[in-house]
Amino acid sequence: MMRNTVSTRYRFWLGSAAALISAVAFSSNVVLSKLAYDFGANLHALNLVRATFLLVCLLLAVWLSGSQISIKRNELYRCLILGVLLCAEMYLLLASVLFIPAALAILVFYTYPIMIALWTWCTGRNHLSYFGLGVMALAFIGLIIALTGSDTLLVGWVGKNGIALALISGVCMAAILLLSERILEKQPAKIMMLYLLLSTTAVIGFVSLFIAELTWPASFPGWLALCGSSALYVIATLFLFKAVDLVGSLQTAIIDNTAPVWAMIVGIVVLGQWLSTQQVIGASVTVAAVMLLQWIARPRTQSKL
């Protein structure tokens, strides 16, 4: 019994660490993406490099581990659906900023942890208390404080398209984590991600080569930003699904909710974008709420009789 308790605690903290690494890597990737765009790259080129790089990494991992890649047809279909959802999430979120400020797009997108919490709570898959739900709401309020100014949310009726795109992107992200959690009950993470990326790369490759126009960085620093962004995206994705495998979709989403905070911090270091007092307060509220949720959700140590 004690061994099972230790194993559960180990998985919890290891999975939480993986989710945190994913959040930080994703945030850093966003900042470097901005630099790549500034040097001439477009989102289609960036997505193509990301997907290809991640697929190559997974192929190498599967080959080196000697894992069996054959899976049941139903599981294959689910993995392919995950790939399509990942494409939709990537493009919809990037498209939303054409209509609304990036801060508002991120804010709407990061309602997805609340979607997962409500889904798991309503379906009985997680016993998060009303207090826990309240703390999740507090974390989201922290994002509102940090990411919005006095007039950022006032996008008018024209912004409804951008809000809808960001919201649908969040729904896709919630579906990705929930569906991947079910697949990971039967398949290793790297096998699931391999088939997921085959689907994702196929869709992105088709769009990039036959529909959209690819534009690449015009200088060496731009290529560094592009490659760095792609590498960080690979790290973020690998650790994200590892976290789902270890602690489930809800716990992963809770920690991933801190990603906008890390993006602001990385923005200070890389872009020199200093935080205002309002942003510091909002970031502090979000981080404190997530830390409290970690304390609530931690595995309890059984007392000795």
Image (cartoon, helix red, strand yellow):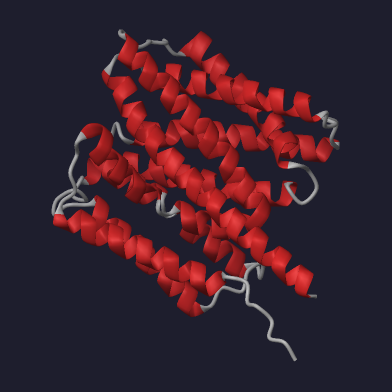
- In percent of width and height, residue 255 lies at 48, 56
Where's residue 122, x and y in %? 60, 69
Give the residue furthest to the front.
304
Outermost residue, bottom direction? 305
Judging depth in this view, the residue of 200 and 287 nearest the camera is: 287
Q: Nearer the viewer, residue 252 or 178?
A: 252
Location of residue 149 in the rendering, given as x and y in whole percent from the top left corner: 17, 52
The residue drawn where x is 52% and y is 17% is 207
Can you say which quadrant of the picture contains the N terminus? bottom right
Q: Is residue 56 left or right of residue 49?
A: right
| Position of residue 36 in the picture relative to residue 101 (left or right) | right
Q: Nearer the viewer, residue 151 or 129?
A: 129
Residue occupying image coordinates x 29% and y 45%: 265
Please say if 12 is above or below 231.
below
184 shown above or below 29: below
Is residue 101 visible in the rendered image? The answer is: no
Quick check: can you spot residue 277? Answer: yes
Nearer to me, 235 or 216 = 235
The residue positioned 52% from the left and 34% from the top of the image is 88
Residue drawn where x is 63% and y is 57% of the image: 248
In percent of width and height, residue 121 lies at: 59, 69
Instruction: Tell me the quarter of the picture where residue 225 sits.
Output: top left
Q: How many marks?
A: 0
If the image is split into quadrants, where does the C terminus sit? bottom right
